[in-house]
Every structure is written in structure tokens, then in C-alpha cells.
Image (tube, rainbow, N blue to C red):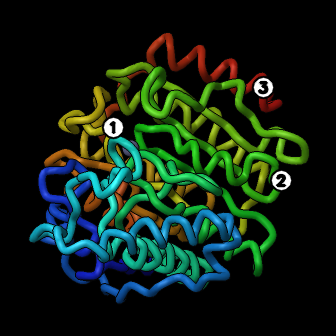
Amino acid sequence: MKQSLITGPVFEYHNRPGHIECYDRLRAITAQLPEGIPVRAPVAAADEDLERVHQPGYLSWLHRQCAIHSEYDTVDEYGCTGGYFTGNTYVSGFLDENTYINPRSYEVATFAAGSAIAATERALDGESCFALVRPPGHHAASDWAMGFCLINNTAIAAAKALTSVDRVAIVDWDVHHGNGTQEIFYGNDRVLYCSVHAEDFFPHSGAVTETGTGAGTGYTANAPLPQKSTIGDYVHIFSDVFLPLLEREHPDLVIVSAGQDALVDDPVSGMSLLPADYGTLAGLLLDALDLPPAFVLEGGYGPSQPAAINAIFAAVSGKRSSGPVPEPSAGARERVQMLRKLHGLR
Ligand code: ZN
């Protein structure tokens, strides 16, 4: 299958050294990319693309919050404000305790979203494409920023695709539940959202019973897994829940919210995936759907993330893992049973 990737130096400008979601994580990925995959330049999303997903008032507020920081000359050498009082207003470089901004952040976020759109356009054209972008997006909802995310790259790409196709599926394997993506499409019957994530973990949403609302009922599938889950558990969720749902839905496009923070060496979570396991998951999607996926980078903070991304590229090239897969845990089996019942899979 043809494939390409999108990345570029613009993503360096949203940065805060020492923060876990800093440019170094993308630098580590781009320093270890496999040979021979065409690299496409990032593109910015248009306002109308952003406004399909986010409320205009939120976007103007976010833009202003980033701009405010350019009005002060105490911006540090990294382009970040540190947080200080001016008059009676506390001016901070953070929108919440972990989501930082700087004067370039809004612009960079529009490039992340536009590049996610471009990746889906490549996928619709028959070429799998990985948007290696940041800041990540899946915690950003229609009118709030959260969890390092300012605007929702994957949702914006899905919404744009829906202007030309009927149905889109989003598979979110980031270890955190994509609460923003879920909120944006919760009542939508043209977007199937499937998320596997750690239970009882940030952002503390994504229960099995959250399945959608109104016309969107049944179009959200959440598989929370206990910490220390292995590829055996993930394969069980994919094979017995996500893939049957995807096959039933017949999407025109699959977007993977690709956060590789369930790796065993990731500092933020306690899952037990190995780099090759992400190739296994990508291979399952590729073999079940015969559609070139668009991948959009979400989280992933550990030293083996570049290897996991290389395993995804290898899977798109046709490589399949032949190693044994561990048996699923009792917890994963229970999740699968509940999900199959809730989603009418017999
Ligand atoms: Zn994450």
C-alpha cells in the first residue's frame, strides 16, 4: 500500500522544554523514521474547517489567549510565559494545570489540524498517510481545551471528510480516552468512534456504557482496560468488538487517533504494549477493512515511541507479526462481553 507522512519544523514553535508534551517527542520520532517514505509539508486548516467542530467563540477566545502572551515582553527564551500577576489578572502560560500555550500555539494548532485533514485527503485518494503533528487533539472538545490539546485535529479531519463521504470511523488507541472527540460526535450517526484506553485514568470518561446519544446511539464504543493490559487484551477488543463494528458500519474512511502512550516504557501510563504491538493493531485494521488509514499523532511520551511508529509504517507496507499473542485477561473478556451485548454483536 502506498504511504506517506506529514511533518515539519512548524510544530517546534508550540513548545515548553521540560513539559512532557514538548517538541523533543516529535524530534525523536522524526530522527528515526524509516527510509523511503515521502514526507509532505504541513498545511494550515482554514477557519471554516475549524468551525465545523469548534464554536467560533471558543476559537476566538483561544486565539486571544495565545495572543495575550505576545503582548508581554517577559516571554522567555522558549517563547513561553511562566505565569505572573499583572494588575489583578493572573497571566499564565497555561490554560489549565497541564495545557500550556505560547504566542505561536494557535497558529501551530491550525497546522496540526490542517495536516490531519491533508492526511485524510491522501487516504481517500488511496494512500495511507501519517500526520506526525502536535499539539495533540483528542481531549479538545467543541468549546474547551484540555490535556495538552487545543483543537481537535482528528475531529476536524473527520468533519471535513464528511463533506465528501458518507461515513467515517475513528479508532483511538491512545491510552487516554478521547473525551473531546467523543463529545463532538456523540449524537452523530455518521461517525463511529471506537476507543480503547486505561480505565480509572485521565480524563476519567469513556465507560463501556457511554455509547452515544439520540441518532448517535450505538456509534460510540468505549473499551476501558485495566493497567498492565497486554497486546492480547487489545487484540481481543479489536477482533471481537471494534472490527465487527467497523465491518458493520462500512466506513468510507478510517482515521486512527494514534497515541502510543500504552507502551510499557511510557512515563504516563502503566500499560504493557511493546513497539511491535502497534504494528499488530494497524495490521488488524488494514486486513479487516482494505482501506488506507489516515493516522494522526496523539500522545506517546516514552523512548520506544519512534519504534512503535516504525512498526505502524511497516504494517502499512505489508509486514505482519507472527509472534504469539498472550491470552486476554478476565477483565478484557468481561469488557468484550459487555460491549458485544450493548452494541448488538451476536
Ligand atoms: Zn494519551
Q: Residues within 10 Å of mark 1 (few under 14, many from 20)?
A: many
- The secondary structure type at the circle numbered 3 is helix
Residue position marked by numbered label 1 in the rendering? 262
Judge from the rendering whether residue 88 lies leftward or rightward of residue 76; answer left or right.
Answer: right
Inspect the image, locate mark 3, and give the three-letter code of the amino acid beneath it. Answer: Leu
Task: Using the image as rendered, state which of residue 97 and residue 289 is in the foreground.
Answer: 97
Q: Is residue 228 left or right of residue 210?
A: left
At 35% from the left and 27% from the top, the residue drawn is 230
Residue found 25% across the figure and 39% down from its top: 274
Q: Does the beta carbon at disc 1 come under 8 Å from ligand 1? A: no
Give the secondary structure at mark 1. loop
Q: Residue furthest right?
A: 215
Q: Position of residue 134 (x, y in %)?
A: 35, 65
Residue labelled 3 has its Cβ within 8 Å of some atom of ligand 1:
no
Q: Is residue 49 above or below residue 272?
A: below
Q: Quadrant of residue 100?
A: bottom left
Callout 2 secondary element: loop
Q: Amino acid at mark 1?
A: Ala
Q: Which mark is residue 342?
A: 3
- Which label sits on residue 37? none
Pointer 1 or 2: first along the chain: 2
In this figure, which residue is indicated by the disc labeled 2? 189
